[in-house]
Image (cartoon, rainbow, N blue to C red):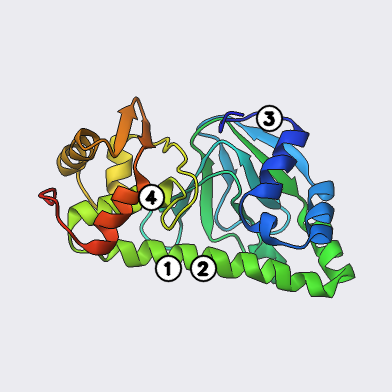
Amino acid sequence: MSDLGPISMADACNVLEREGWLATRPADFREAFLAAGRLRTFAAGDQISTAGDGADVGPGLYGVAAGQVAVLPALGAPDAPTAVLFNPGHWYGYAPLFGATRPIHVRATTATTILSISLSEARRMLNDRPDWWQDLAQLVFATGIVATNVLTDLLLSRSDRRLAAMLLHHAGCRHGGQAHPIYISQEDFGATARLSRHPTRQLLQAFEAKGWLSQSYRCIHILAPEQLRALVDSGEAHGLSL
């Protein structure tokens, strides 16, 4: 099955049952959440949710079933670049359940299918089963860990390590797992690693020459995630830093 949407409800449930946060939850919780969901599809470039929206706006609690979405911070400067990409298995949209507005913008980078659960339905299920709030808390915790890991890697001083780390984050395989294609322009990707166009291009070409990745128009495929992890975590320069 392709990473790109749209897909059927059966395929969406299959993805979300085996990947990401929901796959780690008890069977009754998984079944209830999937049964409450409905499919929504978005074209590349579509806005999925907007920072500042409350419970009455947006798709509710949602899981990416196919495609890829970009998370853009809304707390800093308006020209801040993409923070990270979410791949199939990622869930978000829970902030209004805790009385907060949405803190980020989320935009589809490709044709994307999400499974959406209305916040009223999610709240009803959680209130009917108060023990399930602990399962939702696991999602909040896991999202915080992802954000912390991205921030930690962005503090790396050497450009080759920083770029390699962001490749892994965007592909959803920083510490393991399947490497998803990265659907983003080279310039936009470089900005996520705090690099300008020229060093980004040079480093990506160097990684490609080593067989660690391949590139096509607005898409990067990671071929050797273990080599990129070794670069990030060992600090060995391999003559690549700019």
Residue under numbered circle 2: 144
Query: Distance of mark 4 from mark 1, alpha carbons?
Result: 14 Å
SS of the residue under disc 2:
helix
Query: Distance of mark 4 from mark 2, alpha carbons?
Result: 17 Å
Q: Position of residue 157 (x, y in %)?
A: 19, 63
Of the numbered discs 4 and 3, the one sitting upstream in the chain is 3
Left or right for 87, reference 55: left
Of the numbered discs 2 and 3, the one sitting upstream in the chain is 3
Q: Quadrant of residue 47?
A: top right
Q: Which residue is at the front of the view, 205 or 210? A: 210
Residue under numbered circle 3: 7
SS of the residue under disc 1:
helix
Q: Position of residue 138 (x, y in %)?
A: 64, 69
Q: How many marks?
A: 4
Above or below: residue 2 compared with residue 76:
above
Residue 99 visible in this rendered orientation of the protein: no
Residue type at mark 3: give it: Ile
Marks 1/2 in contact by CB < 8 Å: the verdict is: yes
What residue sits 66% from the left and 71% below the top?
A: 137
What residue sits 27% from the left and 66% below the top?
A: 155
For label 1, count other residues whose C-alpha is less than 10 Å away and answer few (under 14), some (14-19) or many (20+).
Answer: few
Residue under numbered circle 4: 168
Location of the N terminus by quadrant is top right
Q: Position of residue 48 (x, y in %)?
A: 59, 43
Q: Quadrant of residue 43?
A: top right
Q: Using the image, tell me which numbered label, if any, was put on residue 148.
A: 1
Query: Distance of mark 2 from mark 3, alpha carbons?
Result: 29 Å
